[in-house]
Image (cartoon, rainbow, N blue to C red):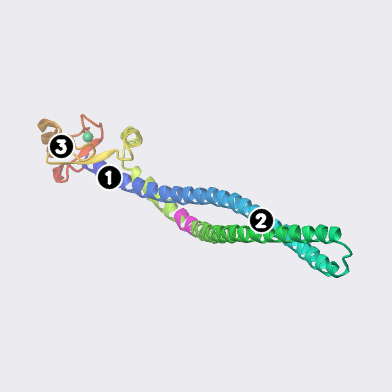
Amino acid sequence: MLNTIRALEQIQRIDLEIKAVHDEEKNFIEEIEKLTSEIKKEQDSFSKLSAEHEELKNAVHEIDEKIRESTERVSKDEKRLNSIKNDKELNALSKEITNANKTKKQGEQEKTSLNSKLDDKKASLDAKEACLKEKSERLVQLTNELDGKRNSWKEILVEKNTLRDSVKEGVKPEILKKYELIKTKRGGLGIVLVQKEICQGCFMHIPPQVYIQLKKGLDELMSCPHCHRILYVENQNQLEAV
Ligand SMILES: [Zn+2]
């Protein structure tokens, strides 16, 4: 039984190494997926900000046009003042100049406010662009890293599986099946060490008679009565090895 125990221990070590490779790959893929969806959101947000920025720019252009027209109107009207013939015309023209000046002033105030909004929008847009750039670069880096690692993982897995197959030869199929079943149910651990009568899989006490039997080294495998994992002790009777 000692040989079986040693073989199972080795198989479990290999299984954990294989699992570590799969976990690493899974983590990479998850991070890439997370980043890809973040980039998508950032792009949407960037497009929205960009459209808002464009709208503000157009609004500023419109105001500029309004200011230009009012300025022209004032200068034209002021020239006409010299050729005024009567009070009625003078009043009408003065009124027009006052209104045009008022429109111009309003336009300038509006422009100041719009420009400030435009500056804020530009700052948000720049920040978003920087963030997007950083995330995109990280994505390229991660994707390249994953591609590189895939080759070495493939080699590791071939090597581990070959070793596992050869170690497996020394274990009876029904015992291997039992190990596999417990391993799947118990988070990757099918065989565990007992230390000071405590199962190192579930950390519960095992009955003293089970511990004594384990120490003696019997012909059959012993299981933890709590978590059902196959148990072994470190200093099992060496003579029992067959
Ligand atoms: Zn246990």
- The mark that comes first in sequence, 2 or 1, is 1
Q: Label 2 neighbourhood size at 10 Å, few (<14), some (14-19), many (20+)? A: some
Q: Quadrant of ligand 1?
A: top left
Q: Give me the C-alpha separation between circle 2 and circle 1.
A: 69 Å
Mark sitting on residue 56: 2
Residue that appears at 76% across and 65% down: 71
> In the image, which residues are magenta?
148-154
The picture quadrant where one finds residue 225 is top left
Secondary structure beneath dot 2 equals helix
Residue 220 position within the rendered picture, expressed as x and y whole percent measured from the top left: 21, 32
User: Which residue position is annotated with label 1?
Assistant: 9
Q: Quadrant of the C terminus?
A: top left
What's the amino acid at mark 1? Answer: Glu
Asked if the beta carbon under badge 2 is closer than 8 A to the nearest atom of ligand 1, the reply is no
In this image, 70 relative to 236: left or right?
right
Secondary structure beneath dot 1 equals helix
Front of the two marks 2 and 1 = 2
- Which is more toward the observer, 62 or 233? 62
Q: Label 3 neighbourhood size at 10 Å, few (<14), some (14-19), many (20+)? A: many
Report the magenta stretch's main SS: helix
Q: Quadrant of the N terminus?
A: top left
Most extreme residue toward the top is 225
Residue 140 vertical position relative to residue 172 in the rendered view, above or below: below
Residue that appears at 45% across and 54% down: 153
Mark sitting on residue 214: 3
